[in-house]
Amino acid sequence: MAAGVVVTLCPLPAGFRIFIFAMITPLVARLASIGDTEDIGMAGMLVLYSGLLVVVGNSVNHALVRSLALRFENLDLIERLDSARVAAEAANRSKTEFLTQISHELRTPLNAALGFADLLRGPKEVLDPGRRCRHIDDIHASGSHLLRLINDILDLAKVEAGKLEPHESMVDLKAALRGCAESLEVEATQAGVAVRLNCPDDLPFLFADSRMVNQIVGNLVSNAVQLTPPGGSVEMSAWADAGGLSILVANAGLDGKFVDGSAPQSALAATEATAAQAPIGARLGLPLARHLVELHQGTLSISSDPALGSSAIVRFPRERSSRPSGLI
């Protein structure tokens, strides 16, 4: 905008000079032709004044150009500041919504664990051994869910700060998947969802951060369980091929959906984008899982079909897989 004003106003001095000289030149020539000393002096004064007018005109024009350019720059700055203000207000609303929902999500499993603990602290004759065992399982499930949620929040903070680094070793992927299925068994049972594991016996080891692998699989399975209606099922499977190691988590429940997210994406943005679609644990877990996979040079792809359910496939490159006896 300012550049356009400069281009428009720059020709003005040339036009002004032409006008001045067109007016003065005939008078100067007439006075000089008379030959009197006074007339020649007057002609010189006219030439001097015309030069002064040109200088003043140039100065006024440049000052006007600078003033208008500065004005338009200020308008652009005001627009940018207004856009920044709107973005800050949106981020603040997202933060408030995030804190409100995360406080509820944190309190729910904690209150459940405390409630079951209070029951167990009561007279032993009130509860039969079977119910006591179920309540202990409920406390364990609530604690595990709470710990997983807290870990996700802390790791997302590290992701946004760029401080999350893997500590890699050889991971027994089949054992990791089995451990994940067992740790989520109570949660899945309470949701009325069956979790099935299908892995070959000769599944290669994975060179990765074992905690991050458990977090990736745990978040995907927990996400699928939360978003699968009662009576549905979640399938976990893994296999090795020429491309490397792959992990599949799929839910076969009607209308089940994975909540998609892209990393590195702000936790607040991920929460706002899917506010009405899933529990906050699922919303935090999937973007984090995607980032953890990418830290291992892998990919996470998600697909959904209303008739078949949804699936998440994690693929690790061939360089990260090996047999216990050596590289494949």
Image: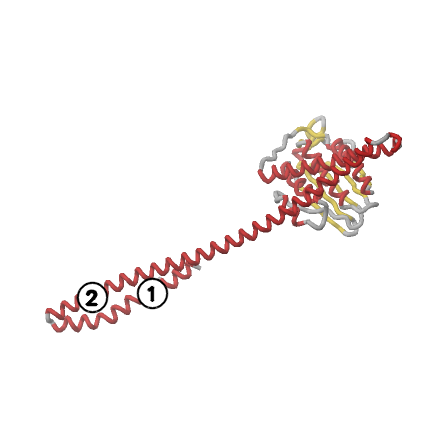
Amino acid tagged 2: Val
**Residue 77 as seen in the image, left or right of residue 240:** left
Cβ–Cβ under 8 Å for marks 2 and 1: no
Q: Which amino acid is tagged 1?
A: Leu
Image x and y of residue 28, in percent: 18, 70
Mark 2 to mark 1 CA distance (whole Å): 20 Å
* 77 on left or right of 107: left
Give whichever of 193, 29 is nearer the camera. 193
Toward which corner of the image does residue 162 lie, by quadrant?
A: top right
Q: Position of residue 178 (x, y in %)?
A: 77, 33
Q: Give percent across and percent down for residue 30.
A: 17, 73
- Identify the residue at horizontal 64%, vertical 37% (top origin): 155
Q: Decide: is 15 above or below 260.
A: below
65 relative to 205, above or below: below
**Does the rendering let one see residue 134?**
yes
From where the camera sits, is residue 241 visible?
no
Left or right, 125 with respect to 92, comes to: right
Horizontal side of residue 46 vs 103, given as left or right: left
Q: Residues within 10 Å of mark 2 (few under 14, many from 20)?
A: some
Name the residue beneath numbered marker 1: 12
Secondary structure at numbered mark 1 = helix
Give me the disc on residue 138: none
Q: How is the image coloured?
A: secondary structure
- The kind of secondary structure element at disc 2 is helix
Relative depth, front residue between 324 and 106: 106
**Quarter-wise, where is residue 52 in the image?**
bottom left
Q: Kindly identify which residue carries mark 2.
A: 47
The quadrant where residue 214 appears? top right
Q: How many marks?
A: 2
Quadrant of image for the N terminus = bottom left
> Which is more toward the observer, 169 or 134?
134
Residue at (71, 26) in percent of width and height: 325
